[in-house]
Amino acid sequence: MKKVYLVVLFILAFGIVSLGFMDNQQSEKHADVDWTIGCQECHAETTPDVFEDWQASRHGTVNFGCYICHGDGEESFYPKGTDAQCGGCHAGQLDSFDNSKFTSCFDCHNGHTLKFHND
């Protein structure tokens, strides 16, 4: 009987942790957007430093779209990119990352330049 309680407790704990994780991964809509212009055109004006950082990065030089990290803005929007978005292309790095002491890709990498913070 004790094993049954432990299994039920484990399932409940897993469910609670999973819900908390899902809440952190849920997205919202991008606020106050003029959908007639693209991300790059808007952010070149509204956040020029961030835009220039991205444009000079490896992702920017190959025109790697904002939506890949941040979502499309209408259906899903992640104000900060998530490790899950990085893993779409960098699955190999995420595998080795799981065995490290870090909690996020952004512990080491700047979100838009993608350089190591100490570079």
Image (cartoon, rainbow, N blue to C red):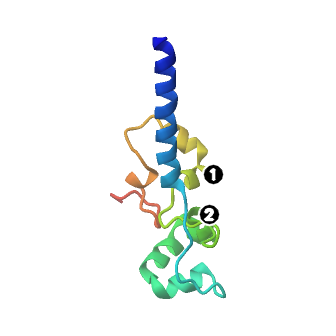
Report the residue that reaches farthest toward the top. Answer: 1
The amino acid marked with disc number 1 is Gly
Q: How many marks?
A: 2
Question: Does residue 105 appear in the picture of this structure?
Answer: yes
Q: Choose between 37 and 95: the one closer to the eye.
A: 37
Q: Residue at x 36, y 59 (%)?
A: 117
Q: Is residue 23 above or below residue 70?
A: above
Query: Relative to residue 20, is residue 42 drawn left or right?
Result: right
Residue at numbered disc 1: 88
Q: Position of residue 70 (x, y in %)?
A: 56, 66
Question: Does residue 108 appear in the picture of this structure?
Answer: no
Q: Choose between 103 and 110: the one closer to the eye.
A: 103
Residues at marks 2 and 1 touching, judged by CB atoms closer than 8 Å = yes
Helix, strand or loop under label 1:
loop
Res 101 → quadrant: top left
> What numbered label is drawn on residue 34?
none
Q: Earlier in the sequence, mark 2 or mark 1?
A: 2
Q: Is residue 113 above or below residue 31?
A: above
Q: Residue at x 53, y 49 (%)?
A: 22
* CA gap, disc 2 and disc 1: 9 Å
Report the residue that reaches farthest toward the left. Answer: 118
The amino acid marked with disc number 2 is Ile
> What numbered label is drawn on residue 68?
2
Q: Residue at x 58, y 42 (%)?
A: 92
Q: Position of residue 111 (x, y in %)?
A: 45, 63
Q: Choose between 52 and 34: the one closer to the eye.
A: 34
Within 10 angstroms of label 2, few (less than 14), some, or many (20 or more) residues?
Answer: few
Res 61 → quadrant: bottom right
Q: Is residue 65 above or below residue 87?
A: below
Q: Position of residue 66 (x, y in %)?
A: 59, 70
Q: Choose between 82 and 112: the one closer to the eye.
A: 82
